Image (cartoon, rainbow, N blue to C red):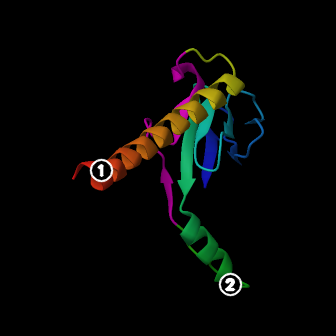
Amino acid sequence: MKLLYCTNCGDIFNLNLKLKECSCGETKGLYVNTQDAVYSGEYAVFLGIDNTSFHEALKTRPLIGMGSKMDAFAIPLFSNATIKLNDCPGCTTFEEAKKFINDRILAQMYKKFIKADIEKFKKEFVD
């Protein structure tokens, strides 16, 4: 799970497929798909919570006392799963960034399928 933290106002918020922003408006972001996210703002910091430990913490949550622990981490400045709007080539809007990221994913999938088809063709007809 990805969260955005605004170091300007101190808000932390989750992401979804609709654009969200902090209370001061300096940090914005959204999920492009189930894994990749785009964001903007000089105060934005991506945080992550390990999904497995999150769900386990919910299952083992006590009635009183110390709560269940889960694994959280600061996502690196340069991550394959996040892109800053300003760093997206030719993107000026979140919609353009969504299209750029999804096109990049489709191109990678296409290359994998083509490579697999070539290998299959070689095994069947060349070897």
Q: Which mark is residue 62?
A: 2
Image x and y of residue 122, in percent: 29, 48
Which residues are drawn in magenta? 71-89
Instruction: Using residue 108 as the reference point, say whether residue 65 is left or right of it.
Output: right
Q: Nearer the viewer, residue 32 or 55?
A: 32
Q: Which residue is mark 1?
A: 125
Image x and y of residue 17, in percent: 74, 43
Give the vertical position of 82 relative to 117 (above or below): above
Q: Quadrant of the N terminus?
A: bottom right
Secondary element at image label 1: helix
Q: Separation of disc 2 and disc 1 at Cα?
A: 62 Å
Tell me where residue 69 sits by quadrant: bottom right
Image x and y of residue 109, in percent: 49, 43
Residue 44 appears in view: yes
Which residue occupies 66% across, 23% down? 96
Residue 7 appears in view: no
First reached walking from the N terminus: tag 2 or tag 1: 2
**75 magenta-colored:** yes
Which residue occupies 21% across, 53% down? 127
Q: Nearer the viewer, residue 68 or 37?
A: 37
**119 magenta-colored:** no
Which residue occupies 59% across, 24% down? 85
Tell me where residue 26 sits by quadrant: top right
Amino acid type, residue under disc 2 in the picture = Pro
Amino acid type, residue under disc 1 in the picture = Phe
Secondary element at image label 2: loop
Which residue occupies 60% across, 35% down? 102
Give the vertical position of 11 relative to 56 (above or below): above
